[in-house]
Amino acid sequence: MERILRGIMRYRVLDRSSMVKQFQQVKDNPVPKAVFYTCMDSRMIPTRFTETSVGDMFVVRNAGNLIPHSQHFVDEMTSCEPAALELGCIINDIRHIIVCGHSDCKAMNLLYKLKSKEESNTEQRRMSPLRSWLCNHGQTSLDKFIAMDGDFSKPMLFTAETPQTKFVAYIDPENKFSTEDKLSQVNTLQQLQNIASYGMLKSRLQKHELHIHALWFDIFTGDIYYFSRRAKTFVVIDESTYETILAEVTRYYS
């Protein structure tokens, strides 16, 4: 707490006045551009690595950047993730949803261990809210990952905006990342499929009024990857790829 309190005092001296001005500018007419789902990992600071500011994004964070599939909810049962979809995309008319996974994700590392029945049995899940969360909402990602049987030269298939719209993905074709990081990338793409399962988004997705994207952040290099449906893989965003990625986004998602 001492570290937090010292930070607040520095904020009062260095940043408070400028932030208040930004709050005043967007108070009556904020125009956020994206709903951004990412992991709660303390190393993930999305507003910093996207250089976004006050009023630019709705940010939702949880263990493993998971968006539960709509099949998990009946009657009044829900959670903050789909509530954020409604608040952001239905009430506030935001047109872009971004899911951002990352390397060395502790939630994904644990999910990988949960392929063992001993690690994921009912008793273990009752003792651990984190294990229960991952078993309930990360199982589809793990199943798809296991089905590859370690051969990631093969394509994976994901459902996109509609059940008829699918895209092919090659996970880490250069074999640069660890096994758990490969699972993290699979999981990030699976969340696009989960998002599209919500009936409240169906019409906007079909009319291309709402778009879903996947990013992946390598915390060891600071590189950020964009999943390109044209390239069928995660492509690093840098000076050599920016224009190509921008053209793809502008063409398909504007």
Image (cartoon, helix red, strand yellow):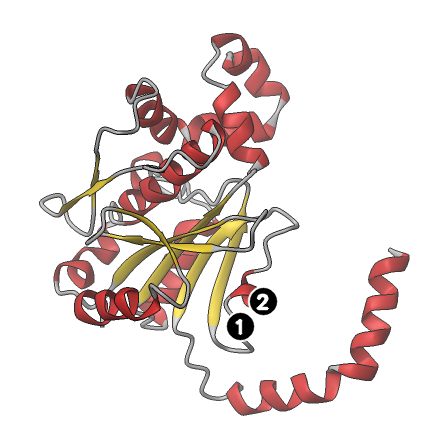
Circle 1: element type = loop
- The reply to whether the C-beta atoms of the residues labelled 2 and 1 are less than 8 Å apart is yes
Screen quadrant of the C terminus: bottom left
Residue type of the residue flagged with mark 2: Arg
Q: Is residue 92 above or below residue 44?
A: below
Q: Which mark is residue 48?
A: 2
User: In percent of the image, x 55 and y 20: which residue is there?
Assistant: 125
In the displayed structure image, the side of residue 170 where residue 32 appears, left or right:
right
Identify the residue position indicated by label 1 in the image: 51
Q: Nearer the viewer, residue 161 or 150?
A: 150
User: In percent of the image, x 34 and y 70: which residue is there?
Assistant: 94
Label 1, residues with CA under 10 Å away: few <14, some 14-19, many ≥20: few
Screen quadrant of the N terminus: bottom right
Residue 12 percent location from the top left of the image: 81, 80
Q: Nearer the viewer, residue 83 or 196?
A: 196
Q: Is residue 250 above or below residue 134?
A: below
